Image: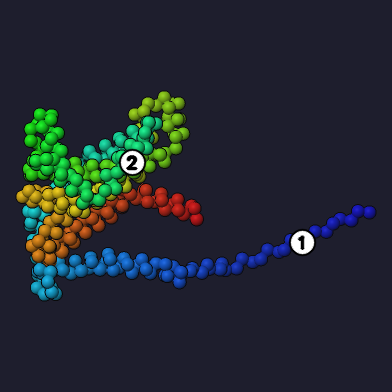
Amino acid sequence: MLTEERRPAPAPPQPAGPRRRRRRPWPTVVAFLSPALVLFALLVLTPIVIAAYSSFFEWNGFGVPTTFVGLDNFHRLLTDEIFAGDLRRALLLVVLSLAIQLPVSLALAMLLNQPLRGRRAYRMLFFTPYVLSEVVTAVLFTMIFSPNQGLANHVTRLIGLGDLGATWLADPDTVMYSLFLVISWKYFGFHTILYLAGRQGIPPELHDAAAIDGAGPWQAFRHITLPLLGPTIRISVFLSILGTIQLFDMIWVLTGGGPIRSSETLAVTMFQEGFKRFHVGYASAISMAIFLISLTFGLLYQRFVLRRDLEGAITTIGDRR
């Protein structure tokens, strides 16, 4: 006689109790964040507070500031033609960068993505100027634009333009375009590599499907490559504009802000006022203006331009959790 094998009865469900809270490792979080927060407070917040405090004084930089002038430095700043000229020159460099430098970098990135012979060498060659420091780049182009023995002057003579290359940095009408040429030579490789990395992140199946559907190269670029490169392009524009606002050392070495202050930027004017004319209070007001312009632009750009990209990044991180 077969006996039915008895199986153990399943355990009755336990009543749902209160969830146990996960104990956050606060001591570990504090231990890891404290050094970074201390360094941030000392190296970033403290100089900002000191500059903001100094901007309310008429101070030559020696001793303790005692002559309180309130908002006079800021009033002088808003009525200063030099400061207005600095803003115009910064805007000119931003427009030239967005209209010429970044599109050329994007075109080069698309070219380097093609199966060309020696494209690795081209990538390294185009990226090399970015490795050089800005001071070294400025010294190099000082020799190229030298009025007597400069390479630019020899080239213009060879093509029949006379001594045109000798006055590129000496003429107030051409000095900003000459500086833009140097800035583009220095940074176009960085943006090219940035775009190239973004292009290689696009799945090739999308272009294969577009080719099967009969799309040409321009249609594939217009409707697939360009939209998917949007986050990379927006980051590139953000870095380009911020870098232009804070431009200093290359211009200082190349022209010193001349001729006749026609190539001064915000940072160069701040240095001139603070360390040449010892108007440290006014220079502090200029530094606060640069800080507020950069901060306002950064916040607005993140709020209205990068918002969708940042939301996508946060969602991706959340999904991984």
Q: Nearer the viewer, residue 226 or 51?
A: 51
Residue that appears at 27% across and 42% down: 188
Residue that appears at 15% across and 46% down: 142
Q: Nearer the viewer, residue 200 or 178?
A: 178
Examine the image and state in which quarter residue 67 appears.
Answer: bottom left
Q: Nearer the viewer, residue 140 or 229?
A: 140
Q: Is residue 178 visible?
A: no
Q: Is residue 75 left or right of residue 205?
A: left
Image spot of residue 178 (x, y percent): 15, 42
Residue 4's place in the image compared with 30, above or below, is above
Amino acid type for the residue under numbered disc 1: Ala
In the structure shown, which secondary structural element does the residue marked by tag 1 occupy? loop
Residue topped by disc 2 = 124
- Image depth: mark 1 or mark 2 in front: 2
In whole angstroms, how far apart are the C-alphas of marks 1 and 2? 71 Å
Q: Which mark is residue 9?
A: 1
Residue that appears at 9% across and 36% down: 164
